[in-house]
Image: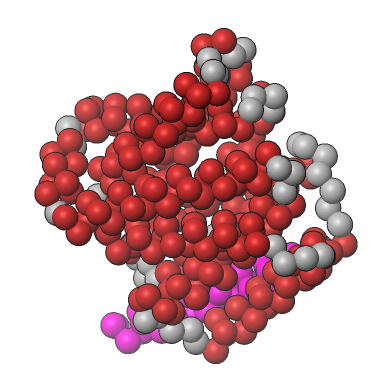
Amino acid sequence: MDKRGMSATFVAYVIGGLLPIYKLFADHVPAWTVVSIRIISAFIFVTLLLRLTGKFKHVKQLWRSKRQRNTVLTAGLVLGGNWTLYLYAIGEGYLVESSLGYYINPLVSVLFGLLFFGERLNRAQLFAMASAVTGVLILTFGYGKFPIIAFSLAISFAFYGVLKKKAAAEPLSGLFLETLVTLPFAVLTLGLTGANPIALPTEALFAIVMLGVATAVQLMLFGYGMPKIPFVYVGILQYIAPTLTLILGVFLFNDVFTPVHFIAFLFIWLAVALFTISGISNGRMKMKKVS
């Protein structure tokens, strides 16, 4: 287990869980405007980092590799599609269902780890997955109908993770191509909707720009850490983000935390605890074998 990879992925999901803070300053801004500015500011930030670090040569190297280039560009389109679907869900009033997608996503990631990378679960991890599935089923039944949007969000983001792991590209150059391929859609959206970012209140524009910067940092950490650790661990770490988002929702945005949420979270965090204990135990066993 790569400790740096695990730490980077952990921090990436912590950042992801805290991203909704921007809504404190820009809740009135239309979702399409937010995602467009988010993409543009992320692209500018990544471009500046490449210039400052002198790593544009890595972009050229990545572009020369047809397999890596096509995989990264596809990942960017999948991520853009995921964001678009999320915004559609929010705009059409499917807030609960879109939130549920972030709880289904880790289970899909674990499944993809088994299918695409031949990873295996030990007995403790199988029990952990059963606990997580139970928690998600409780949330799903609490929603009251089959959550097609939630599953679409979960599958698309998990597939993005698969592409990132298969590409194994240098994080900064990979993210540059991902944001580059989605940039035309962001600019076109601003043009078609007639949105003028400069006309936004200063605090709202600053919050959305920082959202883009934070997103770029999150995806760079994700791109660095995720190829270095088993995909099943990527899946279980993903519960960090929706849990932090829920905490923000309850304490900052007055969202409702029901008994159904409480029971489901007991099962989900039992799963996280079991995965953590199993990982520590396996690490100690490997250290003993080495010594």
Task: Name the residue at 49% across, 68% down.
Answer: 109
Q: Is residue 47 magenta?
A: no
Report the quarter where the C terminus lies.
bottom left
225 and 189: which one is in front?
189
* Residue ranking furthest to the bottom: 123
Q: Inspect this view and state whether residue 213 appears.
A: no
262 and 108: which one is in front?
108
Res 44 → quadrant: top left
- Percent position (x, y) of residue 104? 62, 65
- Percent position (x, y) of residue 252? 76, 36
Q: Inspect this view and state whether residue 95 appears.
A: yes
Question: Which SS type dominates the magenta stretch?
Answer: helix
Judge left or right: residue 184 versus residue 89.
left
Tell me the magenta residue range.
264-291
Task: Name the residue at 18% across, 37% down.
Answer: 55
Q: Is residue 23 above or below residue 88?
A: above
- Percent position (x, y) of residue 222? 41, 52
Judge left or right: residue 111 versus residue 50.
right
* Residue ranking furthest to the top: 199
Judge left or right: residue 26 versus residue 114.
right
118 and 180: which one is in front?
180
Q: Is residue 105 above or below residue 90?
A: below
Q: How many marks?
A: 0
What colour-coding does the image apply?
secondary structure
Task: Name the residue at 61% across, 32% down.
Answer: 31
Q: Is residue 280 magenta?
A: yes
Task: Name the residue at 48% across, 48% down.
Answer: 81
